[in-house]
Image (cartoon, rainbow, N blue to C red):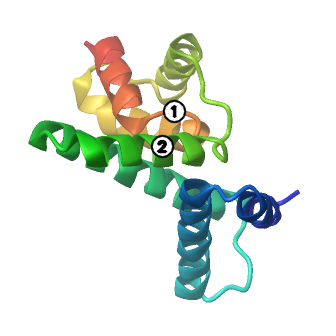
Amino acid sequence: MSLLERLNDDMKQAMKNKEKEKLSVIRMVKAALQNEAIKLGKSQLSEDEELTVLSRELKQRKDSLQEFENAGRSDLVEKVKTEIQILELYMPKQLSEEEIVQLIKETIAEVGASSKADMGKVMGAIMPKVKGKADGSLVNKLVLQHLS
C-alpha cells in the first residue's frame, strides 16, 4: 500500500472517529505531497520523494516544538507534540544509535576518511543510507565523534 493510499484510508477513519487533530495532520501531509508532485511536474511521487516530504514536515514540527518550548507556549507545545506523534506513524522504523554507529563505521571505511576534514565526504555518503530512518543532527554528531 502506497503512502497516499494509507493516508486516504486513515483520513476516512479519522473522519468516522471524529479525530480532528489526526485529520488535520493527514490533510496537511497530503497537501505537502501534492505540492511536491506539482513542483516536480509529476503525477505521482516515488517512495523516496514521499519520504523526503515526510521528513521535511517532521523536521519543521520538531523545530517549531523547540521554539515554542523556548517561548514558554505550553498550549502550542502540546499541539505540535501531537502532530509529531501522528507524523511518526508514517515514517519508516527509526534506526537505533548502535545501528547508526555501525553504518558510520562502515561508511568511514568505504570513503577512507581519517580526520574531521573528511566530514563532508562521510556525511554525503551516509545520509542517503539513513534517509528518513535517523535524525540528521544525531548522525552528524556521531560522525564527528568517530572522526575525532
Tell me the SS state at disc 1: loop
What residue lies at 74% left-to-right and 55% top-to-bottom? 17
* Label drawn at residue 82: 2
The mark lying in front, picked from 2 and 1, is: 2
Q: Is residue 31 left or right of residue 62?
A: right
What residue lies at 88% left-to-right and 57% top-to-bottom? 1
Q: Is residue 11 left or right of residue 87?
A: right
- The crowding category of the residue bearing disc 1, from other C-alpha atoms within 10 Å (few below 14, some 14 to 19, many at least 20), is many
Which amino acid does the dot numbered 2 rest on?
Thr
Q: Nearer the viewer, residue 21 or 81?
A: 21
Tell me where residue 143 appears, x and y as whole percent: 37, 22
Is any part of residue 131 visible from this angle?
no
Which amino acid does the dot numbered 1 rest on?
Ala
Q: Nearer the viewer, residue 133 or 32?
A: 32
Placement of 46 over or under 88, stated as above or below = below
Q: Nearer the viewer, residue 111 or 86?
A: 86
In space, the residues marked 2 and 1 are separated at their CA atoms by: 20 Å
What residue lies at 31% left-to-right and 16% top-to-bottom? 147
Looking at marks 2 and 1 on the same chain, the residue that comes earlier in the sequence is marked by 2
Number of numbered discs overlaid on the protein picture: 2
Q: Which residue is mark 1?
A: 134
* Label drawn at residue 105: none
Picture quadrant where residue 98 is located: top right
Q: Is residue 133 left or right of residue 114?
A: right
View extreme (left): residue: 71
Picture quadrant where residue 138 is located: top left
Is any part of residue 127 visible from this angle?
yes
Tell me where residue 45 appears, x and y as whole percent: 69, 72
